[in-house]
Amino acid sequence: MECLVCGRTDFKTLLNFEKAPKDIQGLLKHEDLENDTFISFDLIQCTHCDMVQLSDFDNIAEDYYDDYIMAQTFSEHSRAYSKRLAEEFVQKYNLQGKSLFEVGCGDGEFLKYLKDAGMDTLGIEPSAPFAKLAEEKGLTIRIEYFGDETPLQPDTHDAFASRAVFEHLKNPHEVLRNVKKVLKEGGIGIIEVPSFEKAIKDNRYYDIFSDHVAYYTKRTMMKLLEEAGFEILEAYNEFEEEYIVVVFRKNSAYHLQHFVDDAQTYKDTFRTTLDTLKGKNIVLWGAGGKGNALLSLCNIGKDDITYVVDADPHKKGRFTIGHHFEIKHPDVIKEDKPDVVIISAMAFKDEILQMLRDYNYRGKIYLIAPTLHEVQL
Protein backbone atom coordinates (compact mmCIF):
# COMPACT_ATOMS: atom_id res chain seq x y z
CA MET A 1 0.00 0.00 0.00
CA GLU A 2 1.38 3.38 -1.06
CA CYS A 3 0.27 6.84 -0.07
CA LEU A 4 -1.93 8.34 -2.79
CA VAL A 5 -0.15 11.68 -2.44
CA CYS A 6 3.56 11.09 -1.73
CA GLY A 7 3.98 7.39 -2.54
CA ARG A 8 5.48 6.49 0.85
CA THR A 9 4.55 3.25 2.59
CA ASP A 10 4.60 4.19 6.28
CA PHE A 11 1.13 4.52 7.80
CA LYS A 12 -0.58 4.61 11.13
CA THR A 13 -4.06 3.16 11.64
CA LEU A 14 -6.70 5.66 12.70
CA LEU A 15 -9.93 3.64 12.78
CA ASN A 16 -11.19 0.16 11.92
CA PHE A 17 -14.52 -0.49 10.23
CA GLU A 18 -15.41 -4.16 10.77
CA LYS A 19 -18.93 -4.33 9.33
CA ALA A 20 -19.04 -1.96 6.40
CA PRO A 21 -21.22 -2.19 3.30
CA LYS A 22 -19.42 -3.17 0.10
CA ASP A 23 -20.51 0.09 -1.45
CA ILE A 24 -23.04 2.81 -0.81
CA GLN A 25 -24.42 3.48 -4.29
CA GLY A 26 -25.59 0.01 -5.31
CA LEU A 27 -28.95 -0.99 -3.85
CA LEU A 28 -29.95 -4.65 -3.80
CA LYS A 29 -32.78 -6.61 -5.33
CA HIS A 30 -34.43 -9.33 -3.23
CA GLU A 31 -32.53 -12.09 -5.04
CA ASP A 32 -29.21 -10.40 -4.19
CA LEU A 33 -29.71 -10.51 -0.43
CA GLU A 34 -28.42 -14.05 0.07
CA ASN A 35 -24.99 -13.28 -1.37
CA ASP A 36 -24.53 -9.90 0.30
CA THR A 37 -21.77 -9.69 2.94
CA PHE A 38 -20.05 -7.03 4.98
CA ILE A 39 -16.44 -6.01 4.42
CA SER A 40 -13.74 -4.72 6.73
CA PHE A 41 -11.17 -1.96 6.22
CA ASP A 42 -9.00 0.46 8.15
CA LEU A 43 -8.72 4.20 7.83
CA ILE A 44 -4.99 4.95 7.72
CA GLN A 45 -2.80 8.04 7.61
CA CYS A 46 0.55 8.54 5.91
CA THR A 47 3.18 9.43 8.52
CA HIS A 48 5.06 11.53 5.96
CA CYS A 49 2.45 13.84 4.39
CA ASP A 50 -0.63 13.14 6.61
CA MET A 51 -2.81 11.93 3.72
CA VAL A 52 -5.76 9.86 4.97
CA GLN A 53 -7.01 6.93 2.88
CA LEU A 54 -8.43 3.44 3.09
CA SER A 55 -6.18 0.47 3.75
CA ASP A 56 -7.76 -1.58 0.98
CA PHE A 57 -8.81 -0.49 -2.50
CA ASP A 58 -9.68 -3.99 -3.73
CA ASN A 59 -13.32 -3.65 -2.71
CA ILE A 60 -13.89 -1.34 -5.68
CA ALA A 61 -14.19 -3.40 -8.88
CA GLU A 62 -12.42 -2.09 -11.98
CA ASP A 63 -15.76 -1.66 -13.78
CA TYR A 64 -17.52 -0.24 -10.70
CA TYR A 65 -18.29 3.13 -12.30
CA ASP A 66 -19.43 1.74 -15.67
CA ASP A 67 -23.07 2.09 -14.66
CA TYR A 68 -22.63 4.33 -11.62
CA ILE A 69 -25.32 6.96 -11.12
CA MET A 70 -25.74 9.10 -8.02
CA ALA A 71 -26.83 12.58 -9.08
CA GLN A 72 -27.53 15.55 -6.82
CA THR A 73 -29.22 17.62 -9.50
CA PHE A 74 -32.64 16.98 -7.97
CA SER A 75 -31.61 19.47 -5.25
CA GLU A 76 -32.34 23.12 -6.01
CA HIS A 77 -29.73 24.16 -3.45
CA SER A 78 -27.10 21.99 -5.16
CA ARG A 79 -27.99 23.30 -8.62
CA ALA A 80 -27.70 26.90 -7.46
CA TYR A 81 -24.29 26.20 -5.96
CA SER A 82 -23.01 24.45 -9.09
CA LYS A 83 -24.21 27.30 -11.30
CA ARG A 84 -22.52 29.91 -9.09
CA LEU A 85 -19.28 27.91 -8.93
CA ALA A 86 -19.17 27.56 -12.72
CA GLU A 87 -19.92 31.22 -13.40
CA GLU A 88 -17.39 32.47 -10.84
CA PHE A 89 -14.70 30.15 -12.24
CA VAL A 90 -15.25 31.33 -15.82
CA GLN A 91 -15.45 35.00 -14.90
CA LYS A 92 -12.54 35.12 -12.45
CA TYR A 93 -10.10 33.36 -14.77
CA ASN A 94 -11.31 34.96 -18.04
CA LEU A 95 -12.33 31.64 -19.59
CA GLN A 96 -15.11 32.84 -21.90
CA GLY A 97 -14.56 31.33 -25.33
CA LYS A 98 -11.92 28.93 -23.97
CA SER A 99 -11.96 25.12 -24.10
CA LEU A 100 -12.48 22.91 -21.04
CA PHE A 101 -12.64 19.18 -20.40
CA GLU A 102 -14.27 17.75 -17.29
CA VAL A 103 -13.23 14.35 -15.96
CA GLY A 104 -16.12 12.50 -14.35
CA CYS A 105 -18.74 14.96 -15.55
CA GLY A 106 -21.62 12.78 -14.30
CA ASP A 107 -24.97 13.88 -15.68
CA GLY A 108 -23.36 17.03 -17.09
CA GLU A 109 -24.88 19.53 -14.66
CA PHE A 110 -21.67 21.47 -13.96
CA LEU A 111 -20.46 21.09 -17.54
CA LYS A 112 -23.72 22.62 -18.83
CA TYR A 113 -23.29 25.62 -16.54
CA LEU A 114 -19.73 26.06 -17.82
CA LYS A 115 -20.99 25.88 -21.40
CA ASP A 116 -23.75 28.39 -20.64
CA ALA A 117 -21.07 30.69 -19.18
CA GLY A 118 -19.31 30.75 -22.54
CA MET A 119 -16.93 27.80 -22.59
CA ASP A 120 -16.34 25.16 -25.27
CA THR A 121 -16.79 21.97 -23.24
CA LEU A 122 -16.03 18.27 -23.41
CA GLY A 123 -17.13 15.74 -20.81
CA ILE A 124 -15.37 12.47 -20.00
CA GLU A 125 -17.57 10.02 -18.10
CA PRO A 126 -17.24 6.21 -17.70
CA SER A 127 -20.83 5.65 -16.65
CA ALA A 128 -23.12 5.09 -19.64
CA PRO A 129 -26.31 6.09 -17.75
CA PHE A 130 -24.64 9.33 -16.61
CA ALA A 131 -23.27 10.01 -20.10
CA LYS A 132 -26.74 9.59 -21.62
CA LEU A 133 -28.19 12.17 -19.22
CA ALA A 134 -25.35 14.56 -20.09
CA GLU A 135 -25.85 14.09 -23.82
CA GLU A 136 -29.54 14.89 -23.39
CA LYS A 137 -28.38 18.33 -22.19
CA GLY A 138 -26.72 18.90 -25.56
CA LEU A 139 -23.21 18.21 -24.29
CA THR A 140 -20.34 16.44 -26.05
CA ILE A 141 -19.36 13.39 -24.01
CA ARG A 142 -16.75 10.64 -24.27
CA ILE A 143 -17.81 7.46 -22.46
CA GLU A 144 -14.52 6.24 -21.00
CA TYR A 145 -12.18 6.35 -18.03
CA PHE A 146 -9.61 9.11 -18.15
CA GLY A 147 -6.00 7.94 -18.07
CA ASP A 148 -2.96 7.06 -20.14
CA GLU A 149 -5.10 5.64 -22.96
CA THR A 150 -7.43 8.63 -23.30
CA PRO A 151 -7.09 9.87 -26.90
CA LEU A 152 -6.90 13.60 -26.16
CA GLN A 153 -4.16 15.54 -27.91
CA PRO A 154 -1.46 17.27 -25.80
CA ASP A 155 -1.69 21.01 -25.17
CA THR A 156 -5.21 21.34 -26.57
CA HIS A 157 -7.41 22.62 -23.70
CA ASP A 158 -7.41 25.84 -21.74
CA ALA A 159 -9.05 24.48 -18.61
CA PHE A 160 -9.93 21.34 -16.64
CA ALA A 161 -12.60 20.52 -14.08
CA SER A 162 -13.36 17.58 -11.81
CA ARG A 163 -15.91 17.38 -9.02
CA ALA A 164 -16.71 14.46 -6.72
CA VAL A 165 -14.10 12.30 -8.47
CA PHE A 166 -10.74 12.40 -6.72
CA GLU A 167 -12.09 10.87 -3.51
CA HIS A 168 -12.77 7.75 -5.63
CA LEU A 169 -9.43 7.57 -7.43
CA LYS A 170 -6.83 4.90 -6.74
CA ASN A 171 -4.54 6.55 -9.30
CA PRO A 172 -4.68 10.34 -8.81
CA HIS A 173 -1.13 10.88 -10.07
CA GLU A 174 -1.86 9.10 -13.34
CA VAL A 175 -4.95 11.24 -13.85
CA LEU A 176 -3.11 14.47 -13.04
CA ARG A 177 -0.19 13.50 -15.27
CA ASN A 178 -2.61 13.22 -18.17
CA VAL A 179 -4.46 16.39 -17.18
CA LYS A 180 -1.14 18.22 -17.33
CA LYS A 181 -0.43 16.71 -20.75
CA VAL A 182 -3.77 17.81 -22.20
CA LEU A 183 -3.77 21.31 -20.70
CA LYS A 184 -2.11 24.13 -22.58
CA GLU A 185 0.69 26.00 -20.84
CA GLY A 186 -0.96 28.38 -18.40
CA GLY A 187 -4.12 26.24 -18.37
CA ILE A 188 -6.40 26.51 -15.32
CA GLY A 189 -7.86 23.60 -13.35
CA ILE A 190 -10.52 23.29 -10.66
CA ILE A 191 -11.02 20.25 -8.42
CA GLU A 192 -13.71 19.77 -5.80
CA VAL A 193 -13.65 16.98 -3.19
CA PRO A 194 -15.55 16.29 0.04
CA SER A 195 -13.88 17.99 2.98
CA PHE A 196 -12.35 15.60 5.48
CA GLU A 197 -11.87 18.66 7.68
CA LYS A 198 -15.66 18.88 7.92
CA ALA A 199 -15.87 15.19 8.83
CA ILE A 200 -13.33 15.70 11.63
CA LYS A 201 -15.00 18.87 12.88
CA ASP A 202 -18.48 17.31 13.11
CA ASN A 203 -17.54 13.71 14.08
CA ARG A 204 -18.88 12.46 10.76
CA TYR A 205 -17.70 8.86 10.91
CA TYR A 206 -20.50 8.04 8.50
CA ASP A 207 -18.56 9.92 5.80
CA ILE A 208 -16.09 7.01 5.65
CA PHE A 209 -17.01 4.16 3.31
CA SER A 210 -15.50 1.94 0.66
CA ASP A 211 -16.61 4.05 -2.33
CA HIS A 212 -14.32 6.84 -1.12
CA VAL A 213 -10.74 5.60 -0.97
CA ALA A 214 -9.23 9.09 -0.34
CA TYR A 215 -10.02 11.69 2.36
CA TYR A 216 -8.51 15.04 1.47
CA THR A 217 -7.92 18.15 3.51
CA LYS A 218 -6.97 21.40 1.80
CA ARG A 219 -3.35 20.72 2.68
CA THR A 220 -3.20 17.19 1.28
CA MET A 221 -5.09 18.11 -1.89
CA MET A 222 -2.70 21.02 -2.47
CA LYS A 223 0.22 18.68 -1.75
CA LEU A 224 -1.08 16.23 -4.36
CA LEU A 225 -1.32 18.97 -6.99
CA GLU A 226 2.09 20.38 -6.13
CA GLU A 227 3.61 16.89 -6.36
CA ALA A 228 2.07 16.72 -9.85
CA GLY A 229 3.79 19.97 -10.80
CA PHE A 230 0.90 22.43 -10.65
CA GLU A 231 0.86 25.89 -9.09
CA ILE A 232 -1.91 26.44 -6.52
CA LEU A 233 -3.92 29.61 -7.15
CA GLU A 234 -6.49 29.26 -4.36
CA ALA A 235 -7.99 26.70 -2.00
CA TYR A 236 -11.15 27.24 -0.02
CA ASN A 237 -14.23 25.60 1.51
CA GLU A 238 -17.60 25.71 -0.21
CA PHE A 239 -21.22 24.62 0.18
CA GLU A 240 -21.40 25.10 3.94
CA GLU A 241 -17.86 23.63 4.29
CA GLU A 242 -18.96 20.32 2.74
CA TYR A 243 -16.42 20.62 -0.07
CA ILE A 244 -12.86 21.71 -0.67
CA VAL A 245 -12.27 23.59 -3.92
CA VAL A 246 -8.74 24.00 -5.26
CA VAL A 247 -7.90 26.07 -8.33
CA PHE A 248 -4.50 25.57 -9.93
CA ARG A 249 -2.48 26.32 -13.04
CA LYS A 250 -0.09 24.54 -15.36
CA ASN A 251 2.73 27.02 -15.71
CA SER A 252 5.96 25.56 -14.38
CA ALA A 253 7.22 24.52 -17.79
CA TYR A 254 6.24 27.86 -19.30
CA HIS A 255 8.04 29.89 -16.69
CA LEU A 256 11.14 27.72 -16.72
CA GLN A 257 11.40 27.85 -20.49
CA HIS A 258 10.79 31.59 -20.44
CA PHE A 259 13.50 31.91 -17.78
CA VAL A 260 15.95 29.86 -19.85
CA ASP A 261 15.16 31.63 -23.12
CA ASP A 262 15.63 35.07 -21.54
CA ALA A 263 19.00 34.33 -19.90
CA GLN A 264 21.12 35.31 -22.88
CA THR A 265 18.90 38.31 -23.60
CA TYR A 266 19.38 39.49 -20.02
CA LYS A 267 23.18 39.22 -20.27
CA ASP A 268 23.28 40.85 -23.72
CA THR A 269 21.12 43.75 -22.54
CA PHE A 270 23.33 44.23 -19.50
CA ARG A 271 26.52 44.24 -21.58
CA THR A 272 25.03 46.61 -24.15
CA THR A 273 24.09 49.08 -21.43
CA LEU A 274 27.57 48.89 -19.90
CA ASP A 275 29.07 49.54 -23.34
CA THR A 276 27.01 52.72 -23.70
CA LEU A 277 28.35 53.84 -20.32
CA LYS A 278 31.98 53.13 -21.24
CA GLY A 279 34.37 55.61 -19.65
CA LYS A 280 31.94 56.53 -16.86
CA ASN A 281 32.75 56.11 -13.18
CA ILE A 282 30.39 53.21 -12.33
CA VAL A 283 29.76 51.81 -8.85
CA LEU A 284 27.95 48.58 -7.99
CA TRP A 285 25.92 48.75 -4.76
CA GLY A 286 25.74 45.33 -3.14
CA ALA A 287 28.57 42.96 -2.25
CA GLY A 288 26.35 40.08 -1.19
CA GLY A 289 25.72 36.83 -3.00
CA LYS A 290 23.53 38.44 -5.66
CA GLY A 291 26.10 41.14 -6.43
CA ASN A 292 28.91 38.62 -6.71
CA ALA A 293 26.78 36.33 -8.91
CA LEU A 294 25.90 39.28 -11.15
CA LEU A 295 29.59 40.11 -11.67
CA SER A 296 30.22 36.60 -12.96
CA LEU A 297 26.95 36.21 -14.90
CA CYS A 298 27.54 39.35 -16.96
CA ASN A 299 31.36 39.10 -16.95
CA ILE A 300 31.73 42.51 -15.32
CA GLY A 301 35.40 43.44 -15.04
CA LYS A 302 37.46 46.41 -13.88
CA ASP A 303 37.06 47.99 -17.29
CA ASP A 304 33.32 48.18 -16.57
CA ILE A 305 32.97 49.35 -12.95
CA THR A 306 35.30 51.06 -10.50
CA TYR A 307 34.44 49.52 -7.14
CA VAL A 308 31.63 48.00 -5.06
CA VAL A 309 29.90 49.54 -2.06
CA ASP A 310 28.02 47.83 0.74
CA ALA A 311 26.52 49.16 3.99
CA ASP A 312 27.63 46.09 5.97
CA PRO A 313 30.63 47.32 8.01
CA HIS A 314 32.11 43.80 8.05
CA LYS A 315 32.63 43.96 4.26
CA LYS A 316 34.47 47.30 4.19
CA GLY A 317 38.05 46.93 2.97
CA ARG A 318 37.47 43.38 1.73
CA PHE A 319 37.43 42.27 -1.92
CA THR A 320 34.92 40.37 -3.99
CA ILE A 321 35.74 36.78 -4.86
CA GLY A 322 36.94 36.20 -8.39
CA HIS A 323 36.90 39.76 -9.74
CA HIS A 324 38.65 41.30 -6.70
CA PHE A 325 36.75 44.58 -6.55
CA GLU A 326 37.44 46.59 -3.40
CA ILE A 327 34.37 46.98 -1.19
CA LYS A 328 33.81 50.46 0.24
CA HIS A 329 31.21 52.02 2.52
CA PRO A 330 28.42 53.80 0.60
CA ASP A 331 29.34 57.13 2.18
CA VAL A 332 32.19 57.32 -0.35
CA ILE A 333 29.55 58.21 -2.94
CA LYS A 334 29.04 61.61 -1.30
CA GLU A 335 32.64 62.58 -2.02
CA ASP A 336 33.42 60.54 -5.12
CA LYS A 337 30.18 61.46 -6.94
CA PRO A 338 30.28 58.52 -9.43
CA ASP A 339 28.48 58.90 -12.74
CA VAL A 340 26.46 55.71 -12.34
CA VAL A 341 25.24 53.56 -9.42
CA ILE A 342 23.96 50.06 -10.23
CA ILE A 343 21.90 48.58 -7.39
CA SER A 344 22.14 44.78 -7.12
CA ALA A 345 20.74 44.50 -3.58
CA MET A 346 17.15 44.50 -4.84
CA ALA A 347 15.59 43.55 -1.50
CA PHE A 348 16.96 46.82 -0.09
CA LYS A 349 16.42 49.03 -3.13
CA ASP A 350 14.00 51.42 -1.42
CA GLU A 351 16.39 51.93 1.48
CA ILE A 352 19.32 52.43 -0.91
CA LEU A 353 17.38 54.92 -3.04
CA GLN A 354 16.59 56.91 0.10
CA MET A 355 20.29 56.92 1.05
CA LEU A 356 21.13 58.25 -2.42
CA ARG A 357 18.56 61.02 -1.91
CA ASP A 358 20.21 61.83 1.39
CA TYR A 359 23.57 61.99 -0.42
CA ASN A 360 21.99 64.45 -2.88
CA TYR A 361 23.18 62.12 -5.60
CA ARG A 362 22.71 63.45 -9.16
CA GLY A 363 24.10 60.67 -11.35
CA LYS A 364 22.36 57.82 -13.16
CA ILE A 365 20.82 54.97 -11.13
CA TYR A 366 20.11 51.48 -12.48
CA LEU A 367 18.25 48.51 -11.00
CA ILE A 368 19.17 45.01 -12.19
CA ALA A 369 15.69 43.41 -12.30
CA PRO A 370 13.76 42.32 -14.24
CA THR A 371 16.35 43.73 -16.66
CA LEU A 372 18.98 46.41 -16.18
CA HIS A 373 16.97 49.65 -16.31
CA GLU A 374 17.37 53.25 -15.25
CA VAL A 375 15.28 54.77 -12.46
CA GLN A 376 14.83 58.26 -11.17
CA LEU A 377 15.08 59.46 -7.59
Image (cartoon, rainbow, N blue to C red):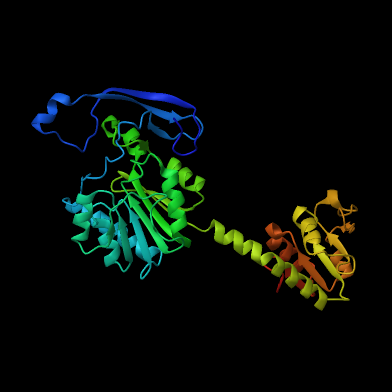
The answer to which of 217 and 5 lies nearer the viewer is 5
Relative placement, left or right, of 363 versus 222 is: right
Q: Residue at coordinates 74% horizontally, 62% vertically from top-left?
A: 352
Relative placement, left or right, of 136 versus 61 is: left
Residue 370 seen in this snapshot: no
The image quadrant of residue 348 is bottom right
- Residue 356 position in % (x across, y down): 76, 67
Q: Residue at coordinates 31% horizontally, 39% vertically from top-left?
A: 62
As displayed, is residue 207 above or below residue 20? below
Q: Residue at coordinates 28% horizontally, 65% vertically from top-left?
A: 115
Relative placement, left or right, of 149 versus 79 is: right
The image quadrant of residue 31 is top left
Residue 263 seen in this snapshot: yes
* Residue at the extreme bottom: 276
Q: Which quarter of the figure is the N terminus placed in?
A: top left
Q: How many marks?
A: 0
- Residue 217 position in % (x across, y down): 40, 40
- Residue 165 position in % (x across, y down): 33, 46
- Residue 305 position in % (x across, y down): 86, 67
As displayed, is residue 340 above or below residue 77? below
Q: Which quarter of the figure is the C terminus placed in?
A: bottom right
The answer to which of 35 and 296 lies nearer the viewer is 35
* Residue at the extreme left: 30
